[in-house]
Amino acid sequence: MKVLSETCKRYRFVGDPVGFRITNAQAEYIAEIRLRYLNREYLLNRTKELDELKNDIARLRDLLSSEEKIRALIAAQLKDIAKTYGAERRTGIVYEQHTPEAEQEEILIDDYNLKIFLTEHNYFKKISLVSMRASSEQYLKDDDKIIQGLETSNRAEVLFFSSKCAVYKTRLYDLPDCKASSLGEYLTNLLGLDADERIIYMAEANDYKGYMLFGFENGKAAKVIFEGYATKANRKKLVNAYSDKSPLTAIHYIAGDCDFYLARSDGKSMLINTALISANTSKSSSGMQVFSLKRNTALAAMLPVEAAAAEGALPSGESGDLEYSRADRIPSAGHYTR
């Protein structure tokens, strides 16, 4: 208003500009208008712009009040965009019922019978039965010995249990063949083991049925459902494959419950059926007490009866000696051999 007042005084306007009832912004706009623009044409154009602005405001208010008109406007704009920038589709639409099945590449893997061996010094041998028939004498290092042998096939999956409570999974067709006259493959390099890690047991895993049986020095035994080692992803290593709460005495795969011979370090032994041991889904289960131990004693051996007989570990004498030491419940203190 101050600007308008000064303008009015400069051009000798008569009257108080406050009487015009206009805002300061309007007053500044008027003050900036050059005198040569104040003619009939200029005023008519400004009046026309004002009418157009009022019409636009009314049209937009009418548009905003109707959902149908808004959608119609959006559709019209999209049609204009498609007309201006549209291009023909470059890909086709294939519906589910017409989707062709992708042809899977057939991977041909030779399948043949073979035998695998594990040695005490961490060497592994995979030898075909044909090669075994030609030469069956195993060549080993002077201080090495075979601790396990399995007869299987080239397509089989094998689990390697290590001394660090881990298990390594691999397909035999991924491992190289060798001959009986060779030392075999060094598992530390083949499986990427730690320098102080050894493979202590092998188990074939084609259908993941049965159990893994672990015996510990503290007299406990764990019967783990073998399916617990199956994985959907193609994982090569599983940690916590068995309990580390007590040193491991024995490890065995069993297809079903069977008789086992157990020996204590002080000379006591017993015969049990693994049905007495509850199955567990946890791989790292510490198991349940099987052998009652005294001070300074430990579980010294746990073998299937057939394996114990083959190794000469069973007590000598009549067959009744075994049944005499059979335990019908656990834990048991066992019996001294008669």
Image (cartoon, rainbow, N blue to C red):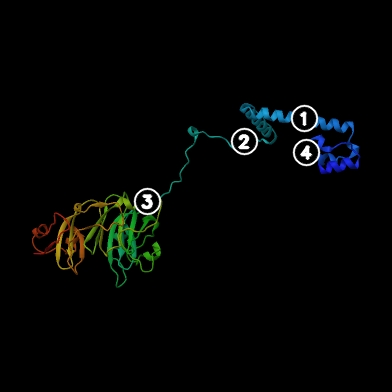
At numbered mark 3, what does the secondary structure look like: helix, strand or loop? loop
Q: CA distance from mark 2 to mark 3?
A: 44 Å
Q: For this rendering, which residue is in front, 86 or 172?
A: 86
Which one is earlier in the sequence, the residue at label 1 or at label 2?
1
Q: CA distance from mark 2 to mark 4?
A: 58 Å
Using residue 87 as the reference point, say whether residue 32 is left or right of it: right
Q: CA distance from mark 1 to mark 2?
A: 42 Å
Q: Nearer the viewer, mark 2 or mark 4?
A: 4
Which one is earlier in the sequence, the residue at label 4 or at label 3?
4
Q: For this rendering, which residue is in front, 41 or 259?
A: 41
Q: Please, what is the three-letter code of the amino acid marked with disc 4?
A: Thr
Residue 231's label in the rendered image is 3
Q: Position of residue 151 (x, y in %)?
A: 28, 56
Q: Nearer the viewer, mark 2 or mark 3?
A: 3
- 152 versus 218 height, above or below: above
Which one is earlier in the sequence, the residue at label 2 or at label 3?
2
At numbered mark 4, what does the secondary structure look like: helix, strand or loop? loop
Q: Please, what is the three-letter code of the amino acid marked with disc 1?
A: Glu
Q: Please, what is the three-letter code of the amino acid marked with disc 2?
A: Arg
Q: Quadrant of residue 330?
A: bottom left
**Farthest-out residue, front:** 15
Q: Please, what is the three-letter code of the amino acid marked with disc 3?
A: Thr
Which residue appears at 40% of the width and 65% of the height?
Answer: 189
